[in-house]
Image: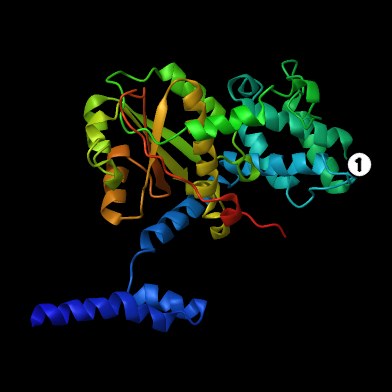
Amino acid sequence: MVKKIRHRLHSIYKNVLPTFFIGTPFVSSVYYLLFSSNFRREERAVLAGKVKHLKDSNKEKASMYTLIRNVHRLEKGLLMRPRREVFALDFIGETMNNFQTLYRPESCVENSQIKWAHDVLNEYFSVTGSHPALNAERERFNKITASPERPKPTSIPYQRIETNKPSISYDSFYKLTKYRRSVRWFQDKKVPHELLDKAILAANQAPTACNRQPYSFRIIDEAEMLDRIVKIPMGTKGYSQNIPMMVVVVGHLDAYFDERDRHLIYIDSSLAAMSLILALETLGLGSCIINWPDIEVKELQMQKILKLENYQRPIMCIAIGIPDSEGMVAYSEKRSLQAIRSYN
C-alpha cells in the first residue's frame, strides 16, 4: 500500500506538477527553483564562464576570445559591399586593448591567430577614413607594431579562386557520408597520433560563431585512464573494453561574455565533430559518437578525471580506432528527404 502511494506521488511529481508551471517564463523558473535542480550545474557553469571572461577582459589581462571575436567582426566590415569609410567605432578600443596586451612581434610566428589579428587590424587602419577616435587607435597600432620584424600582412579577407577549388564531386562526398557509420568494434591496435592530428586539423576548419572555437579535444589512449573514461558514458556497455581511444569534446563557456551564447558550445563543437569523424574515415579510422545526457553523477565523474574547470562541460564522447572488418555496424536508416526538408 505504501509503495503504491509513493509511486502515485512520484508520478504526480514527475508528470502532473510540471503542467502547472508552463504559463510564463517566470512561473517556469519558479518550478525549477523549487522542484527541480536539473539546470543548476548549467547555470553555475554559464556564470563561471562569464566571470572568467570578464576577468580576462580587464585592462591588466586580455581575453583571446574577445580579440578573436572582434577581429572577425572587423573582417566582416572589411568585406561588406559597399564598405563604409568608418566603422567599428564601438569596439575598436576594446579590440586594441586586448591586442596591445597579447601582441609581441615574435608572437606572430608562434601564434597564427595573433598574426591574423595583426594583419586584419593593419588592413582596417589602412583602408578606413579619418575620425578622432579611429585616428587615436591607428596611432596606437602603429606604435605597438613599429618594428623591423613586423610581419607582412597576408591573413586578410580575400576572394576565393575557383581554380583552387578541390576536385571533390558531390557523388564522392555523398558516398563517404553513406559509408560512414558508427563503428563499435576495433582492431587491437593503437591509433597513430599523427592520423588523429590530421583529422583534428580538418575539424579545426569547421565554421564557428565569430571564429571563437569554444571547445577542445581531450584524447585518451593511456590504458589506465582509458579504462576509467570508457566506463563513464552509458552508451558503451558491451563494447567499452574494445575501444582503443576515446576523445572527449569539451565546451568552454569562458568564450562568452553573455548568457545568450551559452548554447554555442554545443553547436560549434558538433560542427567540428562532424568534420572530425568524416576525416577519420579518409584516414582508415572508424568512430562512434557516444550519447552524453546531462546526468550529474556522470558529469562529476568526467570533471574529476579530466580535471575540468567549472566553466568547462563535456559535450560528447567519441570512440576511435581501426575498424575490425569482421565487426558489424548498424544499418540506421535515415528519415526521407520529404520528412526533414521544407522550402519557405
Front residue (pair 302, 61): 302
The picture places residue 92, in percent across and down from the top left corner, at: 75, 45
Instruction: Inspect the image, locate mark 1, and give the three-letter code of the amino acid beneath it.
Output: Gly
Q: Quadrant of residue 139?
A: top right
Instruction: Please give the name of the residue rendered at 42% of the width and 24% of the height, measured from the top-left corner.
Output: 285
Colour pattern of the rendering:
rainbow
Instruction: Tell me the SS state at disc 1.
Output: loop
- Residue 154 in the image: above or below residue 303: above
Binning the other alpha carbons within 10 Å of mark 1 as few (below 14), some (14 to 19) or many (20 upward) gives few
Q: Quadrant of the C terminus?
A: bottom right
Front residue (pair 149, 69): 69
* 75 relative position to 308: left or right: right
* 251 relative position to 61: left or right: left
Q: In this view of the protein, can residue 225 be seen by the observer?
A: no
* 237 relative position to 211: left or right: left
Looking at the image, how many numbered discs can be counted on the residues? 1
Front residue (pair 148, 176): 176
Q: Quadrant of residue 290?
A: top left
* 244 relative position to 70: left or right: left
- Which residue position holds label 1? 129
